[in-house]
Image: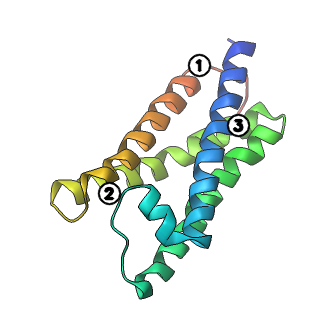
């Protein structure tokens, strides 16, 4: 069974939106970490910890760049691969944030990461459910 043109269009739109979200967040965490965290409505750590926030920003931005790369390209196989590849990272980040909130280490606003990552995992899994006619 081949995937519909509509599914590919939806997948490309999701890649664009997820890519913009992650790339912008990652860039913000790298360039202006304190401002970005305040915009997220979470506590800003001390100055020396902001270097680690920047480091995390590199990875968040890299994930976003991966999505944008496959959105820009035309390969359905690459799009599918990025969706498959990012699911475990989203599961890990979302779960970590949820546990940190549950044990009282982080404020409840961090659940926005859990919700965003969980939503993207669900959408990506839904879009990957069919046979795209691609051998992988």
The residue shown at (35%, 60%) is: 42
Q: Earlier in the sequence, mark 2 or mark 1?
A: 2
Is 40 or 104 nearer to us in this picture?
A: 40
Mark closest to the chain's N terminus, 1 or 3: 3
Q: Position of residue 17 (x, y in %)?
A: 63, 37
Q: Quadrant of residue 9?
A: top right
Report crowding for label 2: few under 14, some 14 to 19, many 20 or more residues within 10 A (C-alpha): some
Q: Is residue 19 visible?
A: yes
Residue 96, label in figure: 2
Measuring from the top left, give residue 31's x and y in whole percent: 62, 71
**How far apart are labels 3 and 2 at the CA level?**
26 Å
Residue 62: x %, y % from top left? 64, 60
Residue 130, numbered circle: 1
**Label pair 1/3, CB-CB below 8 angstroms:** no
**Residue 28 percent across, percent down from the top left:** 59, 63
Q: How many labels sit on residues?
A: 3
Which quadrant, please, contains the N terminus? top right
101 on left or right of 62: left
93 versus 130 height, above or below:
below
Residue picked out by circle 3: 79
Q: Quadrant of the C terminus?
A: top right
Q: Residue furthest bottom?
A: 48
Residue at the spot 43% in from the left edge and 85% down from the top edge: 47
Where is 65 relative to 105, above or below?
Answer: above
**Residue at the right extreme, as displayed:** 74
- 41 to 105, vertically: above or below: above
């Amino acid at each position: 069974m081949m995937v519909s043109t509509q599914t590919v269009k939806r997948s490309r739109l999701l890649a664009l939106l997820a890519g913009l979200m992650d790339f912008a967040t990652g860039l913000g965490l790298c360039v202006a970490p304190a401002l970005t965290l305040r915009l997220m409505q979470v506590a800003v750590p001390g100055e020396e910890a902001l270097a680690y926030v920047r480091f995390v920003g590199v990875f968040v931005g890299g994930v976003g760049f991966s999505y944008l790369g496959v959105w820009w390209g035309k390969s359905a196989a690459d799009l599918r691969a990025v969706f498959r590849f990012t699911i475990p990272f989203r599961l890990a980040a979302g779960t970590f944030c949820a546990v940190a909130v549950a044990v009282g280490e982080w404020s409840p606003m961090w659940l926005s990461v859990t919700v965003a990552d969980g939503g993207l995992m669900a959408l990506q899994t839904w879009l990957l459910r069919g046979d795209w006619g691609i051998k992988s």
